[in-house]
Amino acid sequence: MSEEKVTTDIITLTRHVLDEQRKHKEASGDLTLLLNAIQLGCKFVATNVRKARLLNLIGLAGGVHNISGDEQKKLDVISNEIFINALRSSGKVAVMVSEENEEVIIVEEGLKGKYCVVFDPLDGSSNIDAGVNVGTIFGVYRVAEGSPGSVKDVLRPGNEMVVAGYCMYGSSANMVITVGNGVNGYTLDNSIGEFILTHPNITIPSRGKIYSVNEGNAKYWHEACEEYFHSLKFPPEGKNPYSARYIGSMVADVHRTFLYGGIFAYPADKKSKNGKLRLLYECFPMAFLTEQAGGKATTGYERVLDVCPEDIHSRCPIFLGSKDDVEDVEKIYKKYSK
Ligand SMILES: O=P(O)(O)OC[C@H]1O[C@](O)(COP(=O)(O)O)[C@@H](O)[C@@H]1O
């Protein structure tokens, strides 16, 4: 019987980022420590999501609503707390924005660092009670030169973000991250509590065969949006229609789009002028990752990363995924914008 080969040269997320940082002589290690705090949060959430029904962490937190009017789940609340505590105590963060907090969080003197972190601690939480994949989404800015660390440091276009990532909690916990030099994926090995490099250099196929959108909103779609999705379902003679896949958890739908190609969208419509998804801690990080993986992300009319948020919970329409697919969207929207 063949002996199982034990790998001893393990590439953990921390080691991989350190290797990357070493290429940049000026690196201080602060980013690695910040990412360690984010990793701790994700490991904590991964464990509690997995044991939620056993720990009675399923269901609502008891009549508490977040800024978007969503009633908070128990897991929303504890996920939010672990990230705020881990980021604050890392000593590397000055400003935080969470989907679960109405106001921006300014870290007190003495613990203040040079980064700002915007995050959705538990995305797709409407799916949590059904055991469907959910996730954490995060983005990182540097505090602007000479700034004491204020909300102004996060009301900036997404093209100024320096790190973005998500962690998907499903059959396994998958962390996907960019520090501005391509996209890498890591899988949590629960036996040693480390994220191990499993998906190096993720590259989105230039065109896909899958579209992912909530067609339940089709009644409210603008003509450009209608024409685009119609073109995927009723292609010209000789071409196959695209398949539809929609989980309703952005992290899960985007993760599949990164690996298989195609397009994920939450467009603006006649009911919601800017769609549903939040610019700072959903659209920007996913758009940054998409572009770093060779794809594109548009509002229909402009590059998502060039949008400047008016407030910390601004919403933004988004089409992201394979470059050729998103360019088809841009062509059609351009026709209608005229
Ligand atoms: O149910 P809808 O309207 O299709 O919205 C689903 C979208 O809303 C979200 O659940 C929003 O996220 P939250 O759960 O963080 O509020 C996304 O994950 C998902 O893509």
Image (cartoon, rainbow, N blue to C red):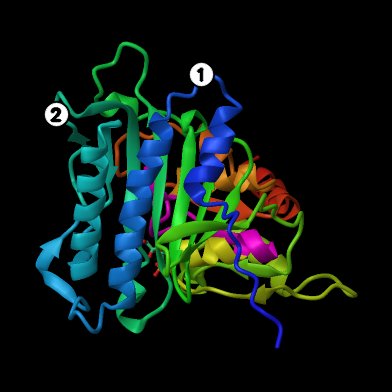
Q: Residue at x 22, y 27 (%)?
A: 112
Q: Is residue 166 left or right of residue 185?
A: left
Q: Residue 38, how many percent across, how many down?
A: 35, 48
Q: Which mark is residue 108?
A: 2
Q: Residue at x 43, y 24 (%)?
A: 28
Q: Which mark is residue 26?
A: 1
Give the total of numbered labels: 2
Relative to 51, say whether 115 is above or below. above
Q: Is residue 42 left or right of residue 212?
A: left
Inspect the image, locate mark 2, and give the three-letter code of the amino acid beneath it: Glu
Inspect the image, locate mark 1, and give the three-letter code of the amino acid beneath it: Glu
Q: Is residue 46 left or right of residue 9?
A: left
Relative to 22, say whether 63 is above or below. below
Q: Residue 132, how many percent across, how many down?
A: 41, 78
- Which residue is most to the bottom? 1
Instruction: Give the quarter the ligand 1 occupies.
Output: bottom left
Relative to 148, say whether 291 is above or below. below
Q: What's the magenta region?
A: 257-282
